[in-house]
Image: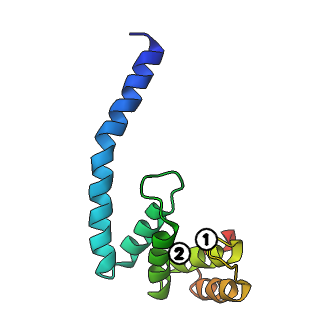
Amino acid sequence: MNLTKKAVWLTLTMFALCGPATAQVTGALKSKAKSGDTAAQLQLGNAYLVAGSNNYNLTEGLFWIGKAAEAGSPEGQARLANAYNTGEIQPPNQQKAHEWYTKTALQDYPKAIDY
């Protein structure tokens, strides 16, 4: 088997092995997120926001990011502020972006400066 065929075979094998596990993780994350776990809410929201993935869903992603933000997650607050600022949430809303950025900054979230 030449190198190209080996690479293709390995890639297809990895996709086949990883597919079902991803669905189970999403199901487990959804259960944790629904129970109020802010880390799970943030992780689930980010999973839905991966462009090109089978799970991509902007509405669901922003819903779970919003839940984490409302529960006090500084990472969720910064992510939600960025969504308002960039227009990922339509229409863009600079006032709401500023409010969420401020909440993040008040918690001394070190990555807030990235936004």
Which image quadrant: the C terminus?
A: bottom right
Q: Earlier in the sequence, mark 1 or mark 2?
A: 2
Task: Label 2: state its secondary structure.
Answer: helix
Q: Which residue is mark 2?
A: 75
Q: Secondary structure at mark 1?
A: helix
Residue drawn at point x = 51 percent, y = 63 percent: 49
Q: Which residue is mark 1?
A: 111
Residue 43 x %, y %: 42, 67
Q: Nearer the viewer, residue 91 or 8?
A: 91
Of tags 1 and 2, the one toward the viewer is 2
Q: Position of residue 13 (x, y in %)?
A: 33, 31
Q: Is residue 3 left or right of residue 14?
A: right
Residue at point 44% right, 61% down? 47
Query: Label 2 is placed on what type of residue?
Result: Glu
- Split into 4 quadrants, where in the image is the N terminus? top left
Q: Tell me which residue sits at (36%, 38%) in the image.
A: 15
In the depicted structure, whether residue 87 falls above or below residue 6: below
Height in image: 59 above or below 1? below
